[in-house]
Image (spheres, rainbow, N blue to C red):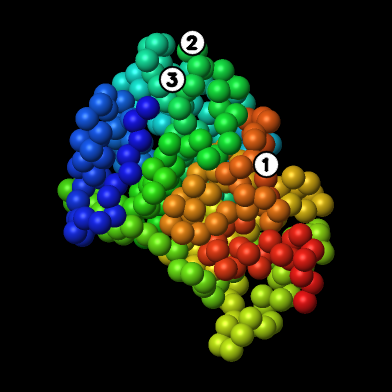
């Protein structure tokens, strides 16, 4: 299988197009057949198409609900449906992706009958549905897996722990559109320039700060948390972590936006389980695993408070999980509180 590890020792390549970046990765592997490259290029195209729809949402009658409910029990917004259909349509064209699993669909969708379609794609087509109509940043999250067995893909093929991901990334549609990707070593961010229609390398070799001063959690759920989470919030709000160390709370309510800020500025994002969401709120395959791969590649960590996200063996397609992402220092303290080692 093809996978690329961009060399971090090169001179700065700021301004390089995403397409060139992907092709250079392929050229580093003489045996590459171009299928992985093709799949990454298709995801980039999808993000351009979705960007176009998001930018014109208020003018193109794609705001609001469709009247449908997805497998998660959530009302489907028109842009959710647009994004999901775009990804499925584009990924089915070149024969690289055997099948895809979407947060919006109950089961997998077979995309290519080609016997050498090597890859599987998992995605949340448009994260942040509740924020679409109020013009707050939203995004697309994706991961790529290897199809390890011959024949048509099945749901079982998708139930691989996150450490098996070949690549992961997200696209954030905000004041600008940014495509962030890793293949396991480095993390790079490409900003979309609509004047030339290209993603250009703007954030090379992203590294999460060793610690930060921002924590993100939905404190309206406080009364439903386990004691360890409440103790952690009380501790982090008091600024007891040494001279000059105090934290500010920020909460957008879109995973892509909150995680993106945490990746660039450090600190910690968490959406824990609670009395209403017994195993957690966020989806392991579509949200937690891709972001866990990104954060670890950037020098951070991702846990449930008790175990590494990338080591969890999925048991079902739409499995939910407690997710904490952040700087290693903050995650270590968080784990101590959740596990009961600290109460402070």
Label 3 neighbour load within 10 Å: few <14, some 14-19, many 20+: many
* Earlier-in-chain disc, 2 versus 3: 3
Give the residue at mark 3. 98
Judge whether 323 appears above or below 268 on screen.
above
**Quadrant of the image occupied by residue 157:** top right
Label 1 neighbour load within 10 Å: few <14, some 14-19, many 20+: many
Of circles 2 and 3, the one toward us is 2
What element does badge 1 sit on?
Answer: strand
Q: Is residue 114 visible?
A: yes
Q: How much space separates mark 2 and mark 1, taking CA atoms?
A: 28 Å
Judge whether 225 appears above or below 246 on screen.
above
Q: Is residue 216 visible?
A: no
Residue 104 placement, left or right of 1: right
| Residue 60 % position (x, y) | 39, 41
Closer-to-camera residue (217/9): 9
| Residue 143 % position (x, y) | 47, 38
Q: How much space separates mark 2 and mark 3, taking CA atoms?
A: 10 Å
Q: Quadrant of the C terminus?
A: bottom right
Residue 11 placement, left or right of 311: left
The structure residue drawn at horizontal position 53% and vertical position 28%, both measured from the top left corner, is: 101
| Residue 256 % position (x, y) | 49, 53
What element does badge 2 sit on?
Answer: loop
Judge whether 1 appears above or below 224 on screen.
above
Q: How much space separates mark 3 and mark 1, taking CA atoms?
A: 24 Å
The structure residue drawn at horizontal position 37% and vertical position 59%, both measured from the top left corner, is: 206
The structure residue drawn at horizontal position 31% and vertical position 21%, both measured from the top left corner, is: 94
Tell me the tag on residue 151: 2
Give the residue at mark 1. 320
* Earlier-in-chain disc, 3 versus 1: 3
């Amino acid at each position: 299988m093809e996978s690329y590890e961009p060399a971090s020792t090169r001179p700065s390549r700021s301004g390089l197009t995403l397409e060139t970046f992907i092709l250079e990765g392929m050229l580093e592997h003489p045996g590459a057949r171009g299928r992985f490259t093709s799949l990454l290029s298709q995801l980039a195209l999808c993000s351009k198409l979705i960007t176009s729809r998001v930018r014109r949402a208020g003018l193109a009658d794609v705001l609001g609900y469709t009247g449908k409910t997805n497998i998660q029990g959530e009302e489907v917004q028109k842009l959710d449906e647009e994004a999901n259909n775009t990804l499925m349509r584009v990924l089915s064209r070149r024969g690289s992706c055997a099948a895809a699993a979407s947060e919006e669909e109950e089961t997998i969708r077979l995309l290519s009958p080609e016997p050498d379609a090597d890859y599987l794609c998992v995605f949340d087509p448009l994260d942040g549905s509740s924020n679409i109509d109020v013009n707050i940043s939203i995004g697309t999250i994706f991961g790529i897996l290897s199809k390890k067995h011959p024949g048509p893909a099945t749901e079982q093929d998708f139930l691989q722990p996150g450490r098996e991901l070949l690549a992961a990334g997200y696209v954030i549609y905000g004041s600008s559109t940014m495509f962030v990707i890793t293949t396991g070593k480095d993390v790079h961010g490409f900003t979309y320039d609509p004047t030339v229609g290209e993603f250009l390398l703007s954030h090379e070799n992203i590294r999460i700060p060793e610690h930060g001063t921002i924590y993100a959690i939905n404190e309206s759920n406080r009364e439903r948390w386990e004691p360890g989470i409440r103790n952690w919030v009380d501790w982090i709000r008091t600024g007891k972590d040494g001279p000059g160390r105090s934290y500010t709370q920020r909460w957008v309510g879109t995973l892509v936006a909150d995680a993106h800020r945490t990746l660039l500025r450090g600190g910690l994002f968490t959406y824990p389980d609670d009395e209403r969401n017994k195993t957690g709120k966020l989806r392991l395959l579509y949200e937690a695993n891709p972001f866990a791969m990104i954060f670890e590649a950037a020098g951070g960590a991702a846990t449930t408070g008790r175990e590494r996200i990338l080591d969890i063996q999925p048991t079902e397609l739409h499995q939910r999980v407690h997710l904490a992402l952040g700087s290693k220092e903050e995650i270590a303290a968080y784990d101590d509180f959740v596990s009961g080692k600290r109460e402070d």
